[in-house]
Image (cartoon, rainbow, N blue to C red):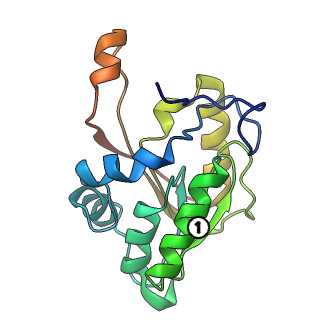
Amino acid sequence: MHRMHHDPKTQSGPQTTGVTIHWISQYDLFAHLMGLGVDGSNSRLITEMAKIKPGDKVLDVGCGTGDLTLAAAKYIGATGSAYGIDAAPEEIEIARKKAQRSDSNAIFNVGLIEKLDFADATFAIVISRLVIHHLPHDLKRQGFREIYRMLKPGGLVFIADFKPPTSPLLAHLTSASACIPGLTKFN
């Protein structure tokens, strides 16, 4: 069984009440099989549905090993910027190595959805894939407030996630997600 919960005694990284995935040795294989890789169909779908375009400033919340952030970086080109944050330092390390190998300008940092280290109205688009279901309700509310704070007027939040089944067996077997667009900020 793989450890998925943040245990401050055995894992490094910031303290959070959300689930932090630390099983990176299998994560990229899983991502590839599910079409979640940099060039995977799910990454393309999300970047297209979120209307990411050249010059945008994009934040990927809960970026894991960076595939969706790197896909976004391809869409924004040299005139935009793509940032990825995740609570697991080991996943950020892998994401940084991927960015370096692919000569991407994507920037990856350890960070928490509930305490984002960016100024108000920084991002045109905030994306997140398969993260929100890992958060308790109070943390979701706090995280959405932080995302809204950083979003530029007219900006877009795009979340791709699923609601886990209540049955433990079905929850274990669940491997698909539903794309749920949401939260366009207007001023």
Secondary structure state at the residue bearing disc 1: strand
Residue, far left: 41
Relative to 181, 185 lies left or right = right
The answer to whether residue 129 shows anywhere in this view is no
161, 41: nearer the viewer: 41
Quarter-of-image position of residue 163: top left
Measured along the vertical axis of the image, is residue 133 above or below residue 120? above
Residue that mark 1 sits on: 123
The answer to whether residue 1 shows anywhere in this view is yes
Residue under the point 73% across and 63% down: 118
Task: Please name the amino acid that badge 1 sits on.
Answer: Phe
Relative to 112, 79 lies left or right = left
Residue under the point 66% across and 65% down: 121
Q: Residues within 10 Å of mark 1 (few under 14, many from 20)?
A: many
Question: x, y percentage for residue 6?
Answer: 66, 32
Residue, far top: 167
Residue under the point 74% across and 47% down: 115
Relative to 46, 89 lies left or right = right
